[in-house]
Amino acid sequence: MNSYMLALVAVTGGVTILLRAMPFILFGSGKQPPAVIGYIGRVLSPAAIAMLVVYCMGVYAESRMTAEHMFGAAELIAAAVVVLLQLWRRNPLLSIIAGTAIYMVLVQCVM
Amino acid sequence: MRFSPVVRRAFISSLPVMMGYLAMGFAAGVLLAAHSGISMPAVWGATTSATSISGALQFMIVDWARMQTPLMQVALLTLCLNIRYAMYGLSLIGKFKNITWWKKLYLIWSLTDETYALEVAEKESSHNDSIRYCLTLAALNHLYWIAGVTSGAVAGMALPFSDKGIDFAMTALFIVILTDQCREAQNRIPAAIGGFAAIIAFLIFGSQNMLIPAMIIMITAFVVARPKLDAKREAKVNE
């Protein structure tokens, strides 16, 4: 049995469920939530996603910013395709599948 | 077999979610089998998808499993990634009142972005029907997600082509979410602050140690900038 995976399930599941239950635990009796909670929740969601985009691109930057890999051109091209497709068609699945497919072709066949 | 009209309505409104969850879950499952390096990916795919039911988290779990990321860091990241869930319940407190505790627990546990959106929008004629509709919808969406991730993990163990580069699916998912969030003007400055904090943390600490410092930087920035950012939003609402 993989004990790290068990702990991972417990931590990710536990934190997520606790977050979902938070409003019912704190404000179930009709109390008003303080404004600062609403504010942090509102601004943190887009900020955390932007951080994860930087993180993902950073992982690529560390291993693929070399002449051999054309300084990360595959990542930049695929990322641009995802943004443009999403702006144009607004279909998350299409954007993700097309972007990933283009990236796989680029890293396997070109750079 | 015949289903009641309420159950049928819940099933019909779950259909778009089914397409999304099966496909997205499948991608996350393939990644888990191909990139996490764990044994029995199908079992862990089923377990993780059943317990947390969370898209972005499902992709992060692949990285965490591979790198055996410290659990404290996992907890903090899960908190930031899913903090929006803590807002959802606020608009459902009234609807979920006066029902059996285990039904309430399940409705809370199963509250994903898509399930939330449909539950807030539902307009059944009685409280009983409302709860039945929500329970059916939540269980269906939950099943779609588990089925997607688990079948992806099974398929990922024997891909008929090279999977090199398939890890970009996670990057693409985050880019898609960010693109959609930036359609709303009020999200752009917070996203820019988050991205800027992450770049600073990346340059100083490198990708493997950047997330906690990045979160500290951005939360500090948000607390400091609150008079400005919050006021701006209120001005917009009052317009």
Image (tube, coloured by chain):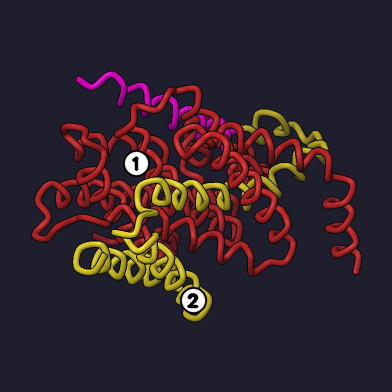
Chain colours: A yellow, B red
Q: Main secondary structure of the magenta part?
A: helix
Mark 1: which amino acid?
A: Ser
Q: Which mark is residue A84?
A: 2
Q: Chain of mark 1?
A: B
Residue drawn at the location 16% of the way across and 34% of the way down: B40
Percent x, y of residue B107: 50, 41
Percent x, y of residue B227: 89, 46
Mark 2: which amino acid?
A: Leu
Is any part of residue B19 visible from this angle? Answer: no
As drawn, is A84 to the left or to the right of A66?
right
Residue drawn at the location 68% of the way across and 66% of the way down: B184
Rendered view: A103 above or below A31: below
Residue A78, quarter of the rendered image: bottom left
As drawn, is B49 to the left or to the right of B175?
left
Q: Nearer the viewer, residue B18 or B224?
A: B224
Residue B67, quarter of the rendered image: top left
Q: Residues within 10 Å of mark 1 (few under 14, many from 20)?
A: many
Q: Chain of mark 2?
A: A
Percent x, y of residue B36: 26, 38
Residue drawn at the location 44% of the way across and 31% of the way down: A12
Q: Secondary structure at mark 1?
A: helix
Residue drawn at the location 49% of the way across and 76% of the way down: A84
Magenta residue span: A1-21
Q: Secondary structure at mark 2?
A: helix
Any magenta on residue B176? no
Q: Nearer the viewer, residue A94 or A38?
A: A94
Q: Residues within 10 Å of mark 2 (few under 14, many from 20)?
A: some
